[in-house]
Amino acid sequence: MSINQSGWRPEMVAGSGNVPATSTGNTFTGNRALMLEEALIFEIGSTETTGVEVAAPVTTASKLGSLARTAPIGLPGLSEPETVRHYTRLSRQNYAIDLGLFPLGSCTMKHNPRLNEKMARLPGFADVHPLQPVDTVQGALAVINELAVWLIKLTGMHGVAMSPKAGAHGELCGILCIKAALEKRGEGHRKVVLVPESAHGTNPATAAFAGFQVEDIPATAEGRVDTAALKARLGPDVAAVMITNPNTCGLFERDLKEISDAVHEAGGYVYCDGANFNAIVGRVRPGDLGVDAMHINLHKTFSTPHGGGGPGSGPVVLSEALSPFGPLPFTERHGDGHITLVEEESVDDRHPDSFGRMVAFHGQMGMFTRALTYILSHGADGLRQVAEDAVLNANYVLRSLEDTLDAPFGGSGPCMHEALFSDANLADGFSTLDVAKGLIDEGYHPMTVYFPLVVHGAMLVEPTETESKAALDQFIGALRSVAERAKAGDTALKSAPHFAPRARLDETLAARKPVLTWKNPTPVAAAAE
Ligand SMILES: *Cc1c(COP(=O)(O)O)cnc(C)c1O
């Protein structure tokens, strides 16, 4: 393979050889205006090149024994400016919340206020070590404790486990609390967890991982849990139900209190998937609906970055019945303001029933700081407005597009924070995937597609509260235009996107058989991109 040092390879040019810029869009470099093509560092770098010059180390006897490397490591290098350009170019091939509206339903991609970042970077928070003596990290513990108090207040629950590191991790924490509570009651034989059809995939996965048998509960024609079917299934073998509220069809489960009462009556517990809490925060307290455990995705509801931008954080609020079983450690504020960390099951015998630990230390400290900053900068009334504006924006999208796209539950009343459409009225041979790919050409990350599974060809759009009416109108215009092309059978849409660096990737192959190591020489075209 011929390689030069400018990040350019002849093979990158579409067609063969050096094709001059033409009306077909081929260019000498493979670049298209400011959309820069970029090869892998293994393809453009060389083991002979480096961006740094270091003096040869003083040789000392190796203590690695048989572990010592016998061949050169072979890492490719570039000059310093080329290195900067390489990674900057790659970063430009990504779509980000700071570039445009990110309509992913069920993922809540929110604006991450810069104030949160500023606070998380304060050295007193950023530089603490989890093994520091407790007396030297009182400020950090105060952040954890204050955030815990807010989460308990906002949800009307009894306690909170702060340490889980994502929504799914929080689900596991909640289900382990339920398992411990059942075992303590001598009812470890309750092995069934009921999960509605529309549940996020993590719910059944969590229950199965914790050793329960998962049984589906159907949805009604209006997109909510079939309460009658759920009640009919309750019995002495049922450990818990896991219900998402608002649910993944974007609807509020109005029967949740009735369901909780029935589940409790039958001796089970209620797990609520609270990933969609941003639609109801400040308006509804899950504790009032009889929920026993609910995870909160700080990276959704409370705006901490996620995806490529940061780790998740999934604290779990617990009812009075489940709190004694929650994991360690937790913070405790004393009358004099001093905060201690309860780290052992046996401390004064006050927490003997904890099921153990979820993580080695305390959880995602940086995310706690960001979430608390967000909460304090909004205040209670501001958080309520966040929920109201998120719901308003989603309903604006739903009502603006329901004349163009099929909205299967459009008649079920207002939606919550996300709007659900289906592929029902697209032209023959056109699918949700074509609409999603067409949206890329319009400069948007596609909405969530083919989820929830209860709707054929689902398109789930969540606009979040921070989008202005102008931003929503532009997105609605783009989606309408693409949808109309799909309804009219515009064949160009079948090969969209046309303006992206790569067109239709084999996403299934890439997910099922990811090529994670670079092998030389792999023909570029054959690699799973
Ligand atoms: C995001 C989400 C989860 C999982 O949360 P992670 O932080 O991604 O593990 C679970 N349920 C619902 C409804 C979600 O939207």
Image (cartoon, rainbow, N blue to C red):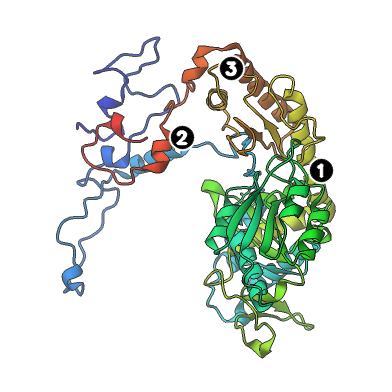
* Image coordinates for residue 413, horizontal then vertical, percent: 82, 35
Tag 1: amino acid: Glu
Report whether 13 appears left or right of 87.
left
Does residue 49 lie above or below 183 as drawn? above
Does residue 303 lie above or below 314 as drawn? above
Residue closer to the observer: 173 or 10: 173
Q: Earlier in the sequence, mark 1 or mark 3?
A: 1
User: Badge 1: few (under 14), some or many (20 or more) residues near its Cα, within 10 Å?
Assistant: many
Q: Earlier in the sequence, mark 1 or mark 2?
A: 2
User: Badge 3: few (under 14), some or many (20 or more) residues near its Cα, within 10 Å?
Assistant: many
Residue 93, numbered circle: 2
* Image coordinates for residue 457, horizontal then vertical, percent: 59, 30
* Image coordinates for residue 292, horizontal then vertical, percent: 74, 64
User: Badge 2: few (under 14), some or many (20 or more) residues near its Cα, within 10 Å?
Assistant: some
> What quarter of the picture does the C terminus occupy?
top left
> Residue shown at 20%/75% (left/top)?
63
Residue 447, numbered circle: none
Residue annotated with mark 3: 486
Q: Secondary structure at mark 2?
A: loop
How far apart marks 1 and 3 lie (CA) works out to 33 Å
Residue 388, numbered circle: 1
Counting every numbered tag in the picture gives 3
